[in-house]
Structure formats: structure tokens, C-alpha cells
Amino acid sequence: MDGLTFSEKNGTLTAYLSGELDHCLAAAVRAKIDERVQERIPAGLVLDISRITFMDSSGLGLIMGRYALCKRIGVPFRLKGADERAMKILDMAGLCSVITAETQTKGSIK
């Protein structure tokens, strides 16, 4: 994975992921996001995956875990920038019915 950056606007924290998100890097990314969320308790968390070039099942776990963390502490969660392939994986996992996801081309899905 080439990077993880954060921005904050109007209390909403956005985590931008870029590059390859695989098993080797998911734990480090997860820890950084969780630390930032727990220290700030933002008004919302947006996980932007529009710049991900590869994601294996650990990426799905990362998304599910951040959703669960946000739900547990009462922070709204939104996934942004999912491509068609990622949406298919999320749908197969049953996540499209519980998380708000904005696709790269089709708008918002809940």
C-alpha cells in the first residue's frame, strides 16, 4: 500500500487509502485508523478506497472492522469510492445492506 492519509472537515474524519491493501498491510492500516478514530471520536468516518489498486479479503475485513468500531462508539460510517469489483465483494458479504457506500460512478448505495 502506497499510503494512508487523513483529512478532517466539519468534524468528519476521512481516511484515504491508496495502493495495494493486502494481508501484510491491513493490520498496520487498521491500527492507524482505529487510533485516530478513538482519539478524536469524530462526527463521522469516511473510508475512501477510490485509490486502491488491489484489495484481498483482508481489505474486506478492514472495512467490516471499521464499520463495527464506528457502530460500537456511535460514529456514522461511510465507504467512499468503491469500484464495481469492490461493490460486488461487499454485496456478496452482505455489507451493502448495512453500510452506506458511495460508488465511483453510480452514486450512493445503502
Image: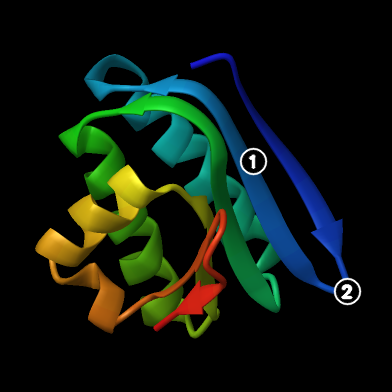
Front disc: 2 or 1: 1
Residue ID at (73%, 43%): 6
Ranked by sequence position, the earlier of labels 2 and 1 is 2
Residue type at mark 2 is Asn
Task: Measuring from the top left, give residue 13's x and y in whole percent.
Answer: 71, 60
Identify the residue at image location x=41%, y=40%.
Answer: 30
Seen at 56% across and 54% down, the residue is: 104
Could you say whether the residue bearing mark 1 is in a helix, strand or loop? strand
The furthest residue to the right: 10
Alpha carbon of mark 2 to alpha carbon of mark 1: how far? 17 Å
Q: Is residue 29 left or right of residue 63?
A: right
Which residue is farthest front? Answer: 105
**Image coordinates for residue 53, horizontal then vertical, percent:** 45, 24
Quarter occupied by residue 10: bottom right
Residue 6 lies left or right of residue 60; in this view the side is right
Kind of residue at disc 1: Tyr
Residue 105 sits in quarter: bottom right
Residue neighbourhood size for the residue with mark 2, other residues' Cα within 10 Å, grouped as few (<14), some (14–19), many (≥20):
few
Q: Nearer the viewer, residue 34 or 60?
A: 60
Q: Residues within 10 Å of mark 1 (few under 14, many from 20)?
A: some
Point out which mark residue 10 bears: 2
Quarter of the image that includes the C terminus: bottom left
Image position, residue 39 (x, y; %): 65, 57
Q: 61 above or below 52?
A: below
Q: Position of residue 92 (x, y in %)?
A: 11, 61
Which residue is disc 1 drawn over?
A: 16
